[in-house]
């Protein structure tokens, strides 16, 4: 597996991925009615800010990161800031850097998760975030 992206999840640790899909910007409008008015479809400002990014074929050695991903199953989600670094061809110099704010896991697939393993493969990780900020 060719590692192209280094992903730093706040104070939890690092994960390395070979592919990241472009963020999807889809919004489901909600129905809104004030008093006896006819219901209207609208998108709230909170809904407009949220976007998704998909990270594929990764490997993680940080137990805190895996715990954070697994915690998303419980419904209790702690958002973190995530820094994404696209590495140059020689994997030494960051080519491009982004920050995802208020990010948390939405979906994931870890096909060979073993609690006592040193590394965990992450086949698929979908992250929801508020803002995408290009740093470099």
Image: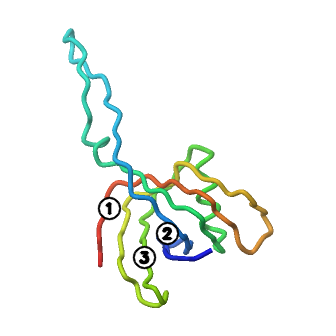
At numbered mark 2, what does the secondary structure look like: helix, strand or loop? strand
Q: Which residue occupies 31% across, 58% down?
A: 131
Quadrant (top left/top right/bottom left/bottom right) for the C terminus: bottom left
At numbered mark 1, what does the secondary structure look like: helix, strand or loop? strand
Which of the two residues, 133 or 90, is positioned nearer the viewer here?
90
- The image's mark for residue 9 is 2
Instruction: Look at the picture and state if 70 lies above or below 43.
Output: below
The label nearer to you, 2 versus 3, is 3
Which callout, 2 or 3, points at the residue further toward the start of the chain?
A: 2
Give the Cα separation between the discs numbered 2 and 1. 14 Å
Instruction: Look at the picture and state if 6 lies above or below 65.
Output: below
Q: Residue 95 appears at what percent x and percent y? A: 37, 82
Residue wearing tag 1: 132
At numbered mark 3, what does the secondary structure look like: helix, strand or loop? strand
- The image's mark for residue 63 is none
Q: Residue 98 appears at what percent x and percent y? A: 35, 70
Residue wearing tag 3: 85
* Number of residue marks: 3
Number of residues whose C-alpha sits closer than 10 Å to that of mark 1, classed few (under 14), some (14–19) or many (20 or more): many
The label nearer to you, 2 versus 1, is 1
Seen in the image, is 87 located left or right of residue 125?
left
Instruction: Look at the picture and state if 88 lies above or below 24.
Output: below
Q: Which residue occupies 34% across, 38% down?
A: 27
Which callout, 2 or 1, points at the residue further toward the start of the chain?
A: 2
């Amino acid at each position: 597996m060719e590692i192209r992206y280094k992903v730093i999840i706040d104070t939890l640790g690092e994960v390395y991925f070979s592919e990241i899909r472009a963020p999807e910007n889809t919004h489901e409008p909600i129905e809104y009615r004030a008093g006896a008015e006819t219901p209207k479809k609208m998108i709230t400002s909170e809904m407009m800010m949220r976007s998704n990014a998909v990270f594929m074929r990764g490997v993680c050695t940080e137990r805190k990161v895996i715990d954070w991903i697994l915690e998303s199953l419980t419904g209790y989600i702690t958002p973190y800031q995530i820094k994404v670094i696209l590495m140059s061809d020689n994997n030494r110099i960051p080519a491009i850097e982004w920050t995802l704010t208020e990010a948390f896991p939405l979906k994931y697939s870890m096909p060979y998760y073993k609690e006592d393993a040193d590394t965990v493969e992450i086949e698929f990780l979908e992250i929801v975030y508020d803002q995408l900020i290009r740093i470099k």
